[in-house]
Image (spheres, rainbow, N blue to C red):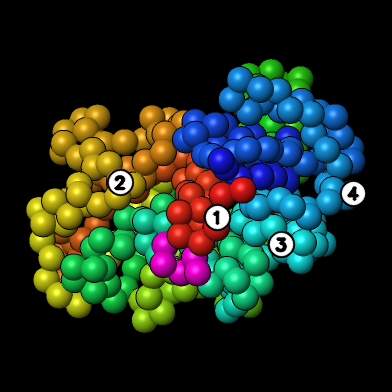
C-alpha cells in the first residue's frame, strides 16, 4: 500500500526532477498525477519506466489525494495550494509563498524533521530556498557541537535556479560569443551572464541587500536557530546546474578544523571531499544528479576567535528543490500519514 501523489508543475525543471526522484527512491506511490498549466496540457513526462500525460492544474480535484508536491511558483501556488489543502491533500510547496508563515513548517529533513508535525495547521509544508537548504545541512551538525553565532556566506548560483529561461539565456549567449552575427541581449538576467558573474539575484530591498540574500537570513533563522546572525552575498554565475557557497562560520565555543571535518563526515546528507591538493575538492559539475551536499576546503578562519571556513556544493535542482521536497514527503509518510 502507498500514497496517492500529485506533482504540480510537472513539465518544469523542478517538477521533472520530483518525478525522477520519487521513482529513484521508490517512494510508495499507489497512484500519481502530473499536473501542468493549460498551455502544457497533454505534455508527456517520465515517472520511472512509465510515461504520464499531464492533466490540467486548474480543473484538477485534489479530493482523495494524499500528498501534492508543488513546483509552480508563488502566484499559482497562492491559487491552488489552499484548494488542495482544503481537500485534505498535504501540500509540500517549493515556492517562497509560505516559507515565512509562522503556521507553516519550513523543513530540511536532516536539520529539523521534527517540525513536520506542524503541517496540520494549514495542511501545507514549505520547502526552503535552494541556497539555504544546502547551507543549513552543513551548518546543523556544527551548530549542535559548538553553537554558531555568525555566518558570512557568498553564493555562486547556477542559472538553473532561474528556470529554463535562465538556462536558455546562458546557452544562447555563449553561442553568440563565438558567432559575431548573433546578438542575445539580457532578458532573464540584468546583464550578460555568459562569461560573466552577476551580484544580483531577485529584487533589491531598501537596505541594499537583495531578496535572495534576505531569504537566506530569514530561512536559516527559522530552520536552524533565530539567534544566528547571517549576512549573505548572492551571485549568479555561468554554470548550468549546481550551487556553490563559500561559508565562514563563527562559533561560541572553540572548534578546530579537524574535529569539524570529523563531524561533517558523520553527518546525514553530507559527503566530505577535502584532500588539500589540486583537484581535492568538489565543483558544481561533479555534483549534478547527486543527492549529497558536498563539503570541501574545511579550514580554520584565523580572523575570529572560533571560526571555520568551508566550501559547500550541491545540485540545486535536487537538494535545493526536488530532493528536499521528496525527503519531506518521506518524513511525512513515516511520522504522520497512514498509507491508503
Q: Earlier in the sequence, mark 3 or mark 4?
A: 4
Observer-side mark, 1 or 4, equals 1
Magenta region, residue range: 113-117
The alpha-carbon separation of the residues under discs 2 and 4 comes to 41 Å
Element on which disc 4 rests: helix
The alpha-carbon separation of the residues under discs 3 and 2 comes to 34 Å
The alpha-carbon separation of the residues under discs 1 and 3 comes to 13 Å
Any part of residue 230 in sight: no
Crowding around mark 1 (Cα neighbors within 10 Å: few <14, some 14 to 19, many 20+) is few
Residue matched to label 3:
88
What residue lies at 76% left-to-right and 25% top-to-bottom?
44
Observer-side mark, 2 or 4, equals 4
Residue matched to label 1:
338
* Residues under numbered marks 1 and 2 in contact, where contact means CB atoms less than 8 Å apart: no
What residue lies at 42% left-to-right and 43% top-to-bottom?
314
Q: Which of marks 2 and 4 is nearer the N terminus?
A: 4
The alpha-carbon separation of the residues under discs 3 and 4 comes to 16 Å
User: Considering depth in this image, is 92 or 257 the residue closer to the camera?
Assistant: 92
**Is 116 included in the stretch rendered in magenta?**
yes
* Residues under numbered marks 3 and 2 in contact, where contact means CB atoms less than 8 Å apart: no
User: Considering depth in this image, is 224 or 249 the residue closer to the camera?
Assistant: 224
Q: Residue 270 carries which label?
A: 2
Observer-side mark, 1 or 2, equals 1
Residue matched to label 4:
59
Horizontal and vertical percent position of residue 141: 25, 61
Amino acid at each position: 500500500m502507498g500514497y496517492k501523489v500529485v506533482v504540480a508543475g510537472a513539465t518544469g525543471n523542478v517538477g521533472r526532477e520530483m518525478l525522477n526522484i520519487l521513482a529513484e527512491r521508490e517512494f510508495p506511490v499507489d497512484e500519481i498525477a502530473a499536473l501542468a498549466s493549460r498551455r502544457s496540457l497533454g505534455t508527456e513526462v517520465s515517472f520511472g519506466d512509465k510515461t504520464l500525460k499531464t492533466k490540467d492544474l486548474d480543473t484538477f480535484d485534489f479530493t482523495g489525494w494524499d500528498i501534492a508536491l508543488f513546483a509552480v511558483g508563488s502566484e499559482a501556488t497562492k491559487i491552488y495550494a489552499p484548494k488542495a489543502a482544503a481537500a485534505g491533500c498535504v501540500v509540500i510547496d517549493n515556492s517562497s509563498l509560505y516559507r515565512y508563515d509562522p503556521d507553516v513548517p519550513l523543513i530540511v529533513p536532516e536539520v529539523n524533521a521534527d517540525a513536520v508535525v506542524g503541517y496540520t495547521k494549514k495542511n501545507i509544508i514549505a520547502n526552503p530556498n535552494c541556497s539555504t537548504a544546502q547551507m543549513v545541512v552543513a551548518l546543523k551538525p556544527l551548530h549542535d557541537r559548538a553553537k554558531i553565532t555568525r555566518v558570512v556566506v557568498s553564493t555562486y548560483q547556477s542559472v538553473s535556479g532561474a528556470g529554463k529561461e535562465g538556462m536558455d539565456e546562458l546557452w544562447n549567449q555563449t553561442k553568440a560569443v563565438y558567432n559575431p552575427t548573433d546578438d542575445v541581449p539580457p532578458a532573464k538576467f540584468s546583464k550578460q551572464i555568459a562569461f560573466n558573474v552577476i551580484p544580483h539575484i531577485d529584487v533589491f530591498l531598501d537596505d541594499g541587500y537583495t531578496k535572495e540574500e534576505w531569504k537566506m537570513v530569514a530561512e536559516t533563522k527559522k530552520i536552524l536557530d533565530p539567534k544566528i546572525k547571517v549576512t549573505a552575498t548572492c551571485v549568479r554565475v555561468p554554470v548550468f546546474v549546481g550551487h556553490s557557497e563559500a561559508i565562514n562560520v563563527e562559533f561560541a565555543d572553540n572548534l578546530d578544523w579537524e574535529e569539524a571535518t570529523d563531524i561533517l563526515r558523520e553527518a546525514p546528507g553530507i559527503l566530505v571531499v577535502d584532500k588539500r591538493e589540486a583537484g581535492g575538492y568538489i565543483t558544481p559539475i561533479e555534483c549534478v544528479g547527486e543527492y549529497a551536499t558536498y563539503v570541501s576546503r574545511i579550514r580554520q578562519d584565523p580572523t575570529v576567535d572560533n571560526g571555520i571556513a568551508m566550501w559547500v556544493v550541491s545540485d540545486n535542482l535536487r537538494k535545493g528543490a526536488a530532493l528536499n521536497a521528496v525527503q519531506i514527503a518521506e518524513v511525512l509518510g513515516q511520522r504522520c500519514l497512514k498509507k491508503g
